[in-house]
């Protein structure tokens, strides 16, 4: 069976345990973005059985017939899931996918940095305002190499809907990104936590909550009782996302894929995933097995007042999707 997942998104010991317990050999491969996953499948790649697309990408893949229909009620562990993450608008009735992990997209910043000591980043302005960027960008800034996440961050900064389809607003988003781009060091969404944050190659990143949390715990000092990286959800709002476990429509091993899906919904397995990734689990039964420091970390499980500022990315119409593609091509030109 072939599993295609985001980079660093499961403890591979879980895969080894599944193989040992059930005798199923797993071929494991990774991708860096939803768009990379979609492009691979649309290009005719066959052999992938289980994939992990995010919310808006699930609806796109359903429309394109790339994911198989499932009977979620047949999964013995489906009752472990928190109802708040079931029956999502991108997949009503969970007819195609089940929840895997969820989190937010905000700002990771280096503790102890002189600029941030005096100016904790509470606004997307630290990523897009040239006057602010000029004060600290020489120390290194990373942005996510993601065609929806980066425009969404700029949209929040400008006061727009992160799913805007307005051509004039998308033009402003592009102009904002291109103006800020000269101050950014890297576009990295696949290994930035271990390649850039932990070794102090940058001091600020547009990042996913779990990756910044990983950098915090990997640099944690027992003497100071602190880590090197902090996480902030900007006051203008931010993206929340839900990644999902789906079976491809081209899979010739759908029964095995469903069995593996059910295995990942086990309470202790779900906890092991979160204990490895530092992302929040939608598995209610897993909570008792998740490390206390993760449960208590508000950058991973945000409080209600923060959740109110979060928005999902949604599938946009065909005309807007083309505009986003053109925007991203312009952003990446010369990168």
Image (tube, helix red, strand yellow):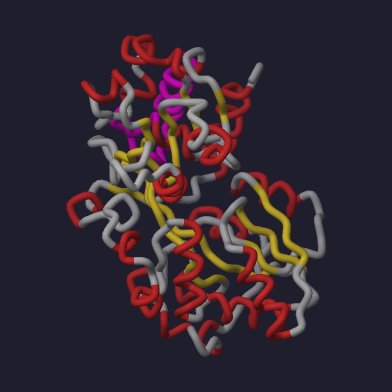
Identity of the residue drawn at 38% across and 24% down: 127
Q: Find residue 193 and report its horizontal and vertical position in percent.
A: 51, 40
Q: Find residue 62 and report its horizontal and vertical position in percent.
A: 60, 63
- Nearer to us in this view, 162 or 196: 196
Identity of the residue drawn at 74% across and 50% down: 40
- Nearer to us in this view, 230 or 188: 230
User: What is the chief secondary structure element of the magenta stretch?
Assistant: helix
Q: Find residue 157 and report its horizontal and vertical position in percent.
A: 32, 28
- Would residue 296 be visible to someone looking at this image? yes
Check residue 158 for magenta coloring.
yes
Q: Which residues are magenta?
A: 154-179
Quarter holding the C terminus is top right
Q: Is residue 220 above or below residue 44?
A: above
Identity of the residue drawn at 47% across and 83% down: 78
- Would residue 319 be visible to someone looking at this image? no
Horizontal side of 234 relative to 322 (left or right) equals left
- Nearer to us in this view, 43 or 231: 231
Q: Is residue 15 above or below residue 148?
A: below
- Nearer to us in this view, 252 or 222: 222
Q: To which quarter of the image does residue 59 belong? A: bottom right
Q: Please count the marks in the image.
A: 0
**Farthest residue, direction left:** 305
Q: Find residue 213 and report its horizontal and vertical position in percent.
A: 40, 48
Check residue 101 for magenta coloring.
no
Q: Is residue 252 above or below residue 148?
A: below
Quarter holding the N terminus is bottom right
């Amino acid at each position: 069976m072939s599993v295609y997942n985001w980079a660093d998104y499961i403890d591979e010991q879980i895969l080894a345990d599944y193989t040992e317990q059930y005798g199923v050999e797993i071929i494991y491969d990774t991708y860096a973005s939803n768009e990379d996953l979609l492009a691979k499948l649309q290009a005719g790649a066959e052999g992938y059985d289980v994939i992990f697309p995010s919310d808006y990408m699930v609806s796109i893949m359903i429309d394109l017939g790339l994911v198989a229909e499932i009977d979620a009620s047949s999964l013995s562990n489906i009752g472990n899931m928190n109802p708040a993450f079931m029956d999502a608008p991108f997949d009503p009735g969970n007819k195609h996918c089940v929840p895997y992990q969820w989190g937010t997209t905000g700002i990771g910043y280096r503790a102890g940095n002189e600029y941030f000591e005096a100016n904790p980043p509470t606004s997307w302005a630290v990523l897009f305002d040239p006057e602010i960027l000029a004060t600290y960008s020489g120390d290194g800034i990373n942005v996510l190499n993601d065609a929806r996440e980066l425009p969404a961050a700029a949209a929040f900064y400008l006061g727009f809907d992160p799913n805007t389809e307005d051509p004039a607003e998308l033009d402003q988003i592009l102009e904002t990104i291109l103006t800020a781009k000269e101050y950014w060091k890297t576009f990295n969404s696949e290994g930035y936590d271990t390649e850039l944050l932990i070794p102090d190659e940058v001091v600020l990143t547009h990042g996913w909550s779990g990756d910044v949390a990983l950098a915090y715990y990997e640099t944690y000092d027992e003497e100071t009782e602190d880590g090197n990286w902090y996480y902030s959800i900007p006051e203008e709002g931010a993206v929340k996302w839900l990644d999902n476990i789906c079976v491809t429509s081209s899979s010739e091993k759908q029964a095995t894929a469903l069995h593996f899906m059910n295995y990942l919904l086990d309470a202790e397995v779900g906890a092991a995933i979160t204990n490895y990734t530092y992302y929040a689990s939608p598995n209610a039964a897993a909570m008792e097995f998740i490390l206390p420091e993760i449960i208590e970390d508000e950058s991973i499980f945000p409080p209600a007042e923060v959740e109110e500022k979060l928005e999902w990315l949604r599938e946009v119409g065909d005309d807007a999707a083309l505009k986003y593609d053109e925007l991203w091509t312009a952003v990446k030109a010369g990168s």
